[in-house]
Image (tube, rainbow, N blue to C red):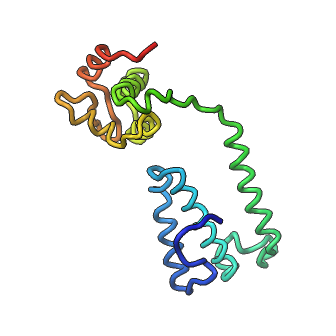
Amino acid sequence: MTDRPGIPARDLSEEELERQGVHAHAMRHWVFLHGTAEQFRTHTERMLELEQEYLRRHPQRTWQGAGDDGTAPSRDARIRDLVQTFSRAITALLDEEPSATPAAADRRDPVAAQAALLRRFTDAPGGRLHKLEAHQMARQLSPDSHLVARLYRQDPPLLQADRDMRVITDAGRAWLEEHPLPA
């Protein structure tokens, strides 16, 4: 496992193992949607460590701990299950099409990054993107984490919020015409 803060799961008290396990599951959704790749990786490792320790201590409390015959699966069976889980995840990643990486110039130049992001809005149906997609695209285009926020705060705003969607405004379209992406 990677170096990470925290007491090894094997050394946790029953109460602390339960508390950390509940907390890890509660945080999963947030880390999945908003965390960095490193945060997601660290969270996944810690959650698996906590789950495996819980299964080791209490195999009959979960479906994963009860084998087909009602007895606890062996250590080898648990290892096989984890390897199969990771193998399916790796296969799914390998089957994906490689995504295009934004040009290095777009990542350095804030105007080019803003133009590239607004272009993605104009290419989207109705000029609308889900807020999480918009923020993810902004992270890919620029190291500036406030890129999207500035687009709604400008006067006039270049984007506007419509519930969970972000929509390019007429001002955003006009700005993009004045700042076209380089060919």
Picture quadrant of residue 132:
top left
- Give me the residue at 58% from left, 57% from top: 41
Q: Quadrant of the N terminus?
A: bottom right
Q: Is residue 66 left or right of residue 175?
A: right
Q: Who is closer to the viewer here, 80 or 49?
A: 49
Q: Quadrant of residue 96?
A: top right
180 relative to 38 in the view: left or right: left
Q: Residue furthest left?
A: 155
Q: Is residue 118 above or below residue 30?
A: above
Taking the spot 67% from the left edge, 42% from the top edge, the residue there is: 93
The residue positioned 50% from the left and 60% from the top of the image is 28
| Residue 63 horizontal/vertical position (percent) | 68, 70
Q: Left or right? Give the position of 171 relative to 8.
A: left
Vertical comparison of 42 with 139: above or below: below
Image spot of residue 107 (x, y percent):
44, 32
* Numbered label tally: 0
From the top left corner, tell me how far across and down residue 155 is, in percent.
17, 29
Where in the figure is residue 72, as x and y percent of width and height?
Answer: 77, 77
The residue located at (41%, 25%) in the rendering is 116
Relative to 24, is 11 above or below? Answer: below
Q: Is residue 119 left or right of residue 101?
A: left
